Amino acid sequence: MITPLFSAPDSFARRGLDLLFRVLDDVMPMNGSQKRDLPMACRDLSALLTTERDGLSRPYWTSPRLTSAYLRYFLPWNLVRLSALLPGLNFGRVPESPLILDMGSGPLTLPLALWLSRPDLRSRPVTLVASDTTPHILELGRNIFDSLRAELAPDSPWTIRTMRASVTQAPRRLYAKPGSLWMISMGNVLNEMEGRRAKPGHQIVDRMRELLENAAAMLSDDGFILSVEPGTRQGGRLIAHLRKSALRGVEEEPEHEDLTAFALREEQAGRRFYDEDDDFDDMDDFGLPPMFTPLAPCPHAGRCPMLDRRTTAWCHVNAPAEHAPAALKELSARAGLDKDSISLSFLLLRKLREEEDVAAESVPSRRHRVPARIVSDAFVVPGYPGRARYACTPLGLALIPHSSHLPPGALCEAWPTRDKDLKSRAVILSLEESSRTDGRENGRKSFSRRLFPEKRPAEKNAKRGRAQNLPRSEQRENVPESFRRRPRRSSRKD
């Protein structure tokens, strides 16, 4: 069974994306020189948000030039990827009058995507509270939302409220009774939290725990938290640590003050190898009762394999971009920032009831199929058939050969084998039950051992004599001719 993660935007969402640029011209018009400078402004803002983050001495919302670039480039691309992701997420039973808090809302990016891509929410009397530290950008977002609603669905009964508050303060400042929130959403917020340290020694993981504790107090039973980050190594690591904090895990990297520095250090160090039997315990670092359980993209509630120090992989998926508006594609090409897909990392959490305990979840048997979430692009592994993909499973990080046909981010079921990839040490999974049987049962080696033999037969024979503690004369007889030490050549002096 294969369940795709992404879906094509419906006709309503496509109409909204096409209408967006005309709405932006009404909300924040540009003169001729600003239009000519727009591609360069998009490139400058892209550099500030990625490779030159140290240059963000003040929020880019204070610059009209960068604000215009964000609204016309980053906002539409974020709506494209969110409109592909949100329809496939299962929010369970939607209340009659949902209350949603969107933290770090900016120009209401995530609320706009929810309204455009979720008809089940668009038709309900949703009260959405958008919080941010910059009131100006919240008002721009409200104007964009009101203009789109007036054009597309004037009867949609949404109520938009704005609130000036930081991410950690927003749940406490919400004028609502504890337990009345249905959902808390965050888009591109965790990387902003990491870049702004509240006080010395107050690390990002401490703020995550504080945020989750405040959120749990305000969320209703079975309430949700949705967090979406860019699909970069930093974004994937932040999402993984948010998940671990939600499960009340103990921090693994206390010596690193910032997760970005840790990720870069891991990338430079390369993959760490370990013994084949050196498997980690899925639940060895969980102490306090968990507050939330992960619903997506995780196919399990055990330890996240992406946080293991022996791997440099990170959880991310690529959303399709073929449905992006023509105006957005044209601007992206002029700015030199055109793209075929958009990478993202995300996490959907559900609040646990008091009687629930996800820590008791057991690791499935290797004799049965396991759920596997595709978390990488397809790539070539020498010796394996076809192209392979990494997947997250209850057994840890897995490698599925011959899986390039699977959709990005798809949830599938696969059969475990007894083998591991010798490079990443990921468990080898098979999409077919007939391929999972260990070759030793029918007199042949399994396919991964045939493709990656651990040692050459001659090398094994060369060491066999020493392993049996035989005399040197007898050891030499067991050594092949090619491995015997040849007599030393005599020099001219000799």
Image: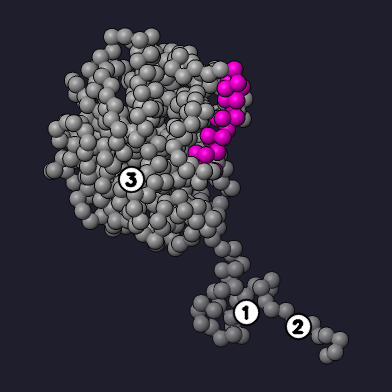
Looking at the picture, tell me which residue is in the foreground, 149 or 444: 149
The magenta span reads: 32-51
Report, in whole angstroms, how far the alpha carbon at label 2 lies from the one at label 3. 63 Å
Location of residue 427 with respect to 166 vertically, above or below: below
- Please state, as top left, top right, bottom left or bottom right, where the N terminus lies in the image: top left
Looking at the picture, tell me which residue is in the foreground, 143 or 155: 143
Q: How many marks?
A: 3
Viewer-side label of 1, 2 = 2
- Please state, as top left, top right, bottom left or bottom right, where the C terminus lies in the image: bottom right
Residue under circle 2? 488
Q: Earlier in the sequence, mark 2 or mark 3?
A: 3
Report, in whole angstroms, how far the alpha carbon at label 3 lies from the one at label 1. 60 Å
Location of residue 366 with respect to 50 vertically, above or below: below
Instruction: Please give the name of the residue rendered at 22% of the width and 30% of the height, measured from the top-left corner.
Output: 182
Q: Quadrant of residue 108?
A: top left
Viewer-side label of 3, 1 = 3
Looking at the picture, tell me which residue is in the foreground, 259 or 349: 259
Viewer-side label of 2, 3 = 3
For label 3, the SS is helix
Report the disc number at residue 477: 1
